[in-house]
Amino acid sequence: MTLWAQIEPLLARVQKPARYIGCEDGLRVAPYSPDRVGWLLIYPDAYEIGLPNQGLQILYELLNERDDARAERAYAPWVDMEEQLRRRHLPLFSVDQHRPAREFDLLAFNLSAELIYTNVLNCLDLAGVPIHSAHRGPEDPLVVAGGHCTFNPEPMADFVDVFVIGDGEEAVGEITSVVHDWKMAARRGRPGSRGREGVLRNLARIPGVYVPSLYDVVYDGQDLAAVVPSYPDVPAQVEKRTIADLGAWPYPRRQLVPMTEVVHDRLNVEIFRGCTRGCRFCQAGMITRPVRERPVEQVRHMVRDGLRRTGYDEVSLTSLSSADYSGIGETVSGIINDPMCTGQVSVSLPSLRVDAFTVGIATEIQKVRRTGLTFAPEAGTWRLRQVINKLIREEDLYGAVESAFSQGWRRVKLYFLTGLPTETDEDTVAIAELARNCVAIGRQSVRSASVTASVGGFVPKPQTPFQWFGQNTLTELQRKISLLREATRGDRGVQLRWHDPKATLAEGLASRGDRRMGAVIEDVWRQGGTFQEWSEHFDLRLWEQAMARHGLSVESSVYRHRDRAEVLPWGHISAGLHQDFLWQDWRDALAESGLEDCRWTPCYDCGACTGYGIEHVVASAVPPAGGSQGTGQDLSRAGAVPVKLSPARARAGTS
């Protein structure tokens, strides 16, 4: 059933009606059949934020290629559309064919940021699905969630039936098969002796799948004591899924091209997953190990085909550190100088390490159009960068900035964190000094050179060496921002931007809590707290009041340091990293001791490779002199070969 006849009259009453019409180039939906498992892939944020998400687009294609599945998409309706839907008792709908959400067998959410959690509950409520998994019956869709936030699933455990931990390409197919069998058995009148619980038990046997209702949470007073399986056939620890060969998954093949403006409105091609730089603050770098590069020829093909099909004139080569891609220079040059692109295609590298950025790269990417250029020193002093293992010296940064301004850039953005472990006021004000020095370097080439220093509050994320660190208080973060404002006052060449410390506190609550945090998230939602990641809707008072109503302490949840013996809320979820490695890396951080990139050094035995029987896959096993980039020479599998790691050695003495 399509709701289009009821949705269309509402479009004149809302902002940006193109958010709700679909019709994108690349839209592909498998034919409807009751025998197919219906997936509604939901990005719980506004359409213009969610549409470019590569994870959702990859799964959308994969599922619609299957004979036993079909997938459509939905996004969180903006507040004006929500008001219209509720007033007319209309449900959440897909943008592809405008079908009601309850018509699908699975509602699958991408959890990319913690402050969208309340939007998940709002979408479920709009869909007419009970927000609590315990209240759902056999006729209700299964609620699935994936994404980086699932590496601590506990705050959302009361609301989600099934979490997928890690890469989803293989897992969604296995989930589809289980649900298909369950669906067919029900149609034949044999739903099984345990109904909904039965399918959840079967799903829990899939590697990388966590079913929270099959686990008991044990408390010792106010302290978390254990999260243990309720049944012997349920795994005590859920190991993440890892796609070993990224080249086997050349998706998305048909990137969606919207009819309205969205963020990152360009062709996006993922060139590798994982990162071995070992930045201790970076959850993404820890949970996506090991490095798996896409073959060079496949990148070229995906770029050429994608540009031809979409009509875009800009391509973004995405990864956690794009300049680390083996042969990045020849890849960028090949795209820009490709005769089929007629010299009109620009390339952006959204994640740049300053110690991998060269004049050659700068020269190439500015040939057509200068795209945005952002470097992330993260900390203002070398001492603090050793603490966080961002091993970038001032000369690295200044060299990259000089390369950029010498090639004609007029503005560079620098990204920093504040509230890092061991941070002093000297470290904080050094951010302003770095920015001033970069302006001075830039003005040797460009008189109007300027630098934007963007500062975010640090949240110690699960599955990182800093997971034991107590987050800076709201008052302390506000004080540090004031220090920076004073330090940059009067500097016309330096523009200071900062993330609201109040939002940093709420993010800490949502990301570091145990299962009790679910009641807080629900409370915030019931008090109208949706779109909390948008500054115009964020309200810290809702979070503080909800914490108080449910007897939870901000101090205990986010501000205090944790010790090695404490049971962490996410301890039963494995990102593939040994806890001994993470703890020792935390101790190394306090000792201001850095670790070099493990692609080019002996193995640190973090567990990411050995735990999954795979190794780093890069285009060259030998780094060039003076840097960590590969040589870019063509090797087996069109340029991608595994790096042979030395036998694991004890962590002691490897610093």
Image (spheres, helix red, strand yellow):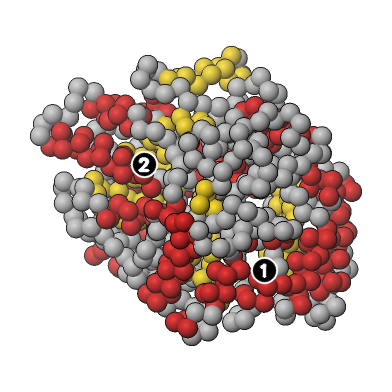
Q: Nearer the viewer, residue 489 or 79?
A: 489
- Quarter of the C terminus within the rendering: top right
Tell me if 233 is positioned left or right of 435 in this view: left
* Residue 448 place in picture, x, y as percent: 80, 80
Q: How crowded is mark 1: few (under 14 residues within 10 Å), some or many (20 or more)?
A: some
Task: State whether residue 412 is above or below residue 638.
Answer: below
Residue type, label 1: Leu
Tell me if 206 is positioned left or right of 5 in this view: right
Q: State the residue lying farthest toward the bottom.
A: 342
Tell me if 124 is positioned left or right of 5 in this view: right
Task: State whether residue 299 is above or below residue 404.
Answer: above
Q: Which residue is drawn at 45% across and 61% down?
A: 638
Residue 626: in sight, yes or no? yes
Please tell me which of labels 2 and 1 falls first in the chain.
Answer: 2
Q: Residue at x 76, y 77 (%)?
A: 406
Q: State the residue lying farthest toward the top.
A: 220
- Quarter of the N terminus within the rendering: bottom left
Instruction: Return the residue at label 2.
Output: 171
Residue type, label 2: Ala
Instruction: Return the residue at label 1.
Output: 373
